[in-house]
Image: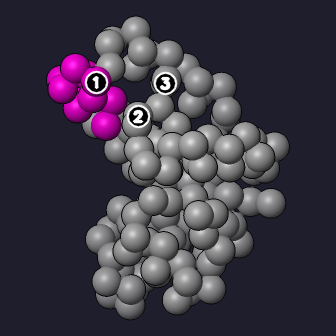
Amino acid sequence: MNCVLDCSFCAALFLPHEKSGVVKDLFRKITDSDLFVPVQFWNEMTELLLTALKRGRLKHADAQEINRLFTMYRFSTETSFGGDYTGRILDLAGLYGLGAVEAAYLELAISKKAALGTLNGKLRTACQKAGIAALL
C-alpha cells in the first residue's frame, strides 16, 4: 500500500496529541508500505521541531533523535514543482478549499494512488470528496 503522511500525522508520533496512540499503532502497521511526503514536509517538520524547542516541549537532543528516526524510515520525497504542478495545486486548493501545503499532500496522494495520513480535518474532508482513503 502507498501512503502519504503529513506533518500533523507524524508530529503525533512524538508530541502529545489526543490521537497519538492511534497514530503510533497505525504507523507501526504501515512502516512496510511505500511512504511518500512532499518536499514541504521537511520544512514543516523542521519548523514544528523548532517551535517545540522554543516552547520547552523538546530538548535539542530529542529533536535531533526525532529527525534521525524520520530519516531512518526513508520517506520518498516528491520534489514536483513548476507551472503544471502549480496548476494542479491551484485546482485542488480551489476545489476543496485548501491551502497550498494541504493541496500538495492531496495532490501527492492522488498521483501515487495512496492513502493519506493526516489529523487535519479539512484535508480529511477533501480526501473523502476526492475519493482518497484517509488513514484515520
Q: Which residue is mark 3?
A: 67
Question: Dominant secondary structure of the magenta stretch?
Answer: helix
Neighbourhood count class around disc 3 (C-alpha, 10 Å): few under 14, some 14–19, many 20 upward: some
Q: Residue furthest left?
A: 54
| Chosen colour scheme | one colour
Residue 118: image location, x then y, percent: 50, 60
Q: Earlier in the sequence, mark 1 or mark 2?
A: 2
Q: Vertically, is 40 above or below 83?
A: above
Q: Which residue is mark 2?
A: 15
Residue 130: image location, x then y, percent: 56, 86
Q: Which residue is mark 1?
A: 57
Instruction: Report the amino acid beneath label 3.
Output: Asn
How far apart are labels 3 and 1 at the CA level? 15 Å
How far apart are labels 2 and 3 at the CA level? 13 Å
Residue 21: image location, x then y, percent: 57, 43
Tell me which segment is drawn in magenta.
48-57
Instruction: Report the amino acid beneath label 2.
Output: Leu
